């Protein structure tokens, strides 16, 4: 939540958080319904929505310097991005709890072992690997995989029934998230953030 978003609704925190939650619901819905294969290449930290939406892409790869963090309880908010559904399915209930409840920072190695990413590439080789994997003349995905074939397979994997479940999870998560935005725990975090920034601004003058 930013000062700009609060000003948009004359400081009304409830209208502001409702709008933020709805915008986020639409953002996640775009991942759920996207018909073409989605690839994520992570070469650094993926925090919050950057981590949760990875579970909605079709294939994610990471460099060995990448890590994944969902610090919801640290911020006083709740899980989002369909992670309450996708994380337990991908990495099991215990690791999902570590991520969603206990602010665990998952390394690239852990992400690979848990199935969260499909491959870990040394950072020094990352850009070259991604370029070749997708665009190489004879071996790249673009030149070896027929687009309609990929889309047909994705429709089978991400069926209409699964999309309905994901949309329902997304909707409910955003309702809870809206309420958490106005909780005492979340407000304390916001006040702390703005207080620290104000103090830095004063010190820098």
Image (spheres, rainbow, N blue to C red):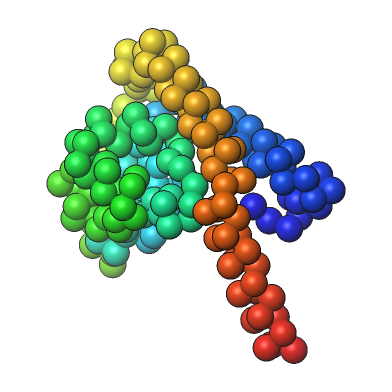
Residue 41 place in picture, x, y as percent = 37, 49
Q: How many marks?
A: 0
Residue 39 can be seen in this image: no
Q: Residue furthest right?
A: 10
Is the residue 164 above or below the residue 129 in the image?
above
Say which residue appears at 27% left-offset and 43% top-offset: 97
Nearer the observer, 63 or 20:
20
Residue 28 place in picture, x, y as percent = 51, 33
Nearer the observer, 37 or 199:
199
Residue 77 can be seen in this image: yes
Q: Quadrant of residue 124?
A: bottom left
Say which residue appears at 29% left-offset and 64% top-offset: 65
Residue 104 place in picture, x, y as percent = 29, 55
Is the residue 94 above or below the residue 174 in the image?
below
Q: Residue furthest top?
A: 161
Q: Quadrant of residue 195?
A: bottom right
- Would residue 201 be found to the left or right of residue 33 on screen? right
Nearer the observer, 12 or 146:
12
- Would residue 136 be found to the left or right of residue 76 on screen? left
Q: Residue furthest left?
A: 113
Residue 101 place in picture, x, y as percent = 33, 47
Q: Locate the C terminus by quadrant.
A: bottom right
Say which residue appears at 78% left-offset and 45% top-offset: 12
């Amino acid at each position: 939540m930013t000062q700009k978003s609060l000003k948009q609704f004359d400081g009304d925190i409830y209208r502001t958080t409702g709008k933020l939650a709805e915008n986020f619901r639409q953002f996640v819905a775009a991942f759920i319904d996207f018909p073409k294969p989605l690839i994520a290449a992570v070469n650094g930290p993926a925090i919050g929505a950057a981590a949760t939406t990875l579970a909605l892409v079709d294939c994610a790869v990471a460099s060995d310097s990448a890590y994944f963090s969902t610090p919801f309880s640290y911020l006083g908010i709740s899980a989002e991005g369909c992670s309450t559904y996708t994380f337990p399915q991908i990495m099991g209930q215990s690791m999902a709890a570590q991520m969603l409840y206990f602010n665990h920072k998952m390394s690239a190695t852990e992400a690979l072992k848990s199935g969260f990413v499909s491959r870990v590439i040394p950072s020094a080789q990352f850009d070259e690997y991604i370029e070749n994997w997708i665009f190489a003349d004879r071996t790249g995905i673009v030149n070896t995989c027929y687009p309609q074939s990929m889309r047909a397979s994705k429709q089978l994997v991400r069926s209409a029934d699964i999309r309905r479940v994901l949309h329902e999870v997304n909707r409910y998560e955003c309702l809870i998230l809206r309420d958490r935005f106005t909780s005492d725990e979340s407000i304390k975090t916001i006040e702390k953030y703005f207080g620290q920034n104000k103090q830095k601004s004063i010190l820098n003058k």
